[in-house]
Image (tube, rainbow, N blue to C red):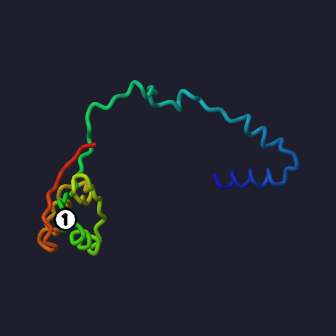
Amino acid sequence: MGYIFSGYIYDSANNVTNDRIMSLQKEIYIDESEIRVFKRQSVKDISVIEKKVKAWIIEIKYNDSNLENISNKLISNGYKLNNNKVKMIISIGPFTAISHAKEESRKLNNILGIDNKISSFIF
């Protein structure tokens, strides 16, 4: 394979006219019936009947007096925060495994003394 390919490059580099390149392109034949192995469907005909991805987040409720203290503890320990000011909840995550969310929840509670709960959602 390498010799044939290198020979083609050598010939085409030394060929002043592009006769050989044009003739090689004409010789290529593709049987489209062999290429089409998947049935094509319109996107309109495809429907999602079941939600499949479940994830978990850790929610920490706060009030105006403890927001700064909680935020500082979390940020200094490397957590990225999402703050819902309307519900007054800081969320951490999402986590794809419940075990990971539980582990982080225990760390927050036992090491940092921050009460929290784990919530799931499906998308």
Number of numbered tags placed on the structure image: 1
Q: Tell me where residue 39 sits by quadrant.
A: top left
The local crowd at label 1, few if under 14, some if 14 to 19, many if 20 or more residues have their Cα within 10 Å, is some
**Residue 84 x/y as whole percent:** 27, 55
- Residue plotted at (71% across, 55% down): 6
The C terminus lies in quadrant: top left
- Residue plotted at (14% across, 57% down): 117
Compared with 92, 23 (above or below) is above
**Residue 30 x/y as whole percent:** 62, 32
Residue 101 or residue 41, whichever sits in front:
101
- Residue plotted at (78% across, 55% down): 10
**Residue 87 x/y as whole percent:** 22, 52
Residue 28 or residue 122, whichever sits in front:
122
Helix, strand or loop for disc 1: helix
**Residue 66 x/y as whole percent:** 19, 68
Instruction: Name which residue type carries label 1.
Output: Glu
- Residue plotted at (18% across, 62% down): 63
Residue 56 or residue 33, whichever sits in front:
56
Residue 118 or residue 73, whichever sits in front:
73
View extreme (front): residue: 64
What residue is pinned by disc 1? Answer: 104
Q: Tell me where residue 76 sits by quadrant.
A: bottom left
Compared with 78, 53 (above or below) is above
Q: Tell me where residue 33 sits by quadrant.
A: top right
Compared with 25, 33 (above or below) is above
